[in-house]
Image (tube, helix red, strand yellow):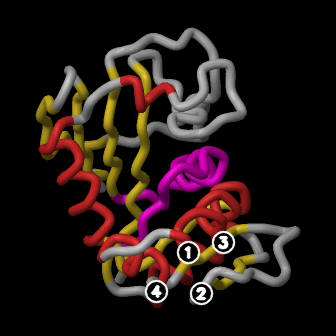
Amino acid sequence: MGTIVVTAFSSLDGVVEAPGGEDFKYPNWSFEFDRGEEGEKFKEDEAFAAEALLIGRRTYEGFASAWPNYEGELADKYNSMPKYVVSSTLTDPTWTNTHVLTGDVRDEVAKLKADVAGEIQVPGSIRLAQTLIAADLVDELHLMTFPVILGTGRKLFTETPDRTTWRLTTTRTVGEGVLITTFHRTR
């Protein structure tokens, strides 16, 4: 059975919007901070641990326009691994090994968890991550919190139909005060 892992860059005030993107009041805000070698290694190890990506259409479009142009072990991993895109508008994905999920998100992801052995990562994809958290389908949260308050922007955590409990399993500070935390869902 697969595990759903939401991975996100966050500000101190919980903003996860456009940490490396352009279309925001503070574009590329996470790149203002050095994650250090340990932070870079965490992100690489995290990527290599994934069996598949689960992403929304916008994240797909950003990744699909970038990763095929890169070379190296990490690019090979992203370009070859299975990618599942939740979308009602994407019909002909061009990025290698991409599958479009068009049905009810909760049902499609529950089926995906049953079919994929290993980690299914959800990087970015704020609305998808919020839907999965609200449906209690997320097994782990990997948060990299940067020492900045943005004061505006979309947040990962919104209202949910019920409360859930999580166990903090790892925490460490890397680079210029960037906090890495990993939480596991307790059932």
Which of pointers 1 and 2 indicates the residue nearer the eye?
A: 1
Q: Amino acid at mark 1?
A: Pro
Disc 4 residue type (three-letter): Ser
First along the sequence among labels 3 and 4: 4
Between discs 1 and 2, the one toward the N terminus? 1
Q: How many marks?
A: 4
Of labels 1 and 4, the one closer to you: 1
Residue position marked by numbered label 3 in the rendering: 85
- Counting residues from the start of the chain, the first of labels 1 and 3 encountered is 1
Residue 157 visible to an observer of this rendering:
no
Q: State the image coordinates of residue 37 (x, y, percent, origin top left).
A: 14, 44
Q: Nearer the viewer, mark 3 or mark 4?
A: 4
Callout in the foreground (1, 3): 1
Image side of residue 2 versus residue 56, left or right: left
Give the labeled residue for mark 1.
68
- Going by the numbered disc 3, the residue's amino acid type is Val
* Residue 129 counted in the magenta span: yes
Q: Of the residues under marks 3 and 2, which one precedes in the sequence?
A: 3
Mark closer to the observer (3, 2): 2
Q: Which mark is residue 80?
A: 4
Query: Where the N terminus falls, by quadrant?
Result: bottom left
* Whether residue 112 can be seen here: yes
CB atoms of marks 3 and 4 within 8 Å: no
Q: Residue at x 78, y 76 (%)?
A: 102
Q: Report which residue position mark 2 lands on.
A: 96
Q: Give how far across and how far down residue 172 sits, in percent.
A: 12, 34
Q: Is residue 46 left or right of residue 80?
A: left
Q: Earlier in the sequence, mark 1 or mark 4?
A: 1
Q: Which residues are magenta?
A: 119-139
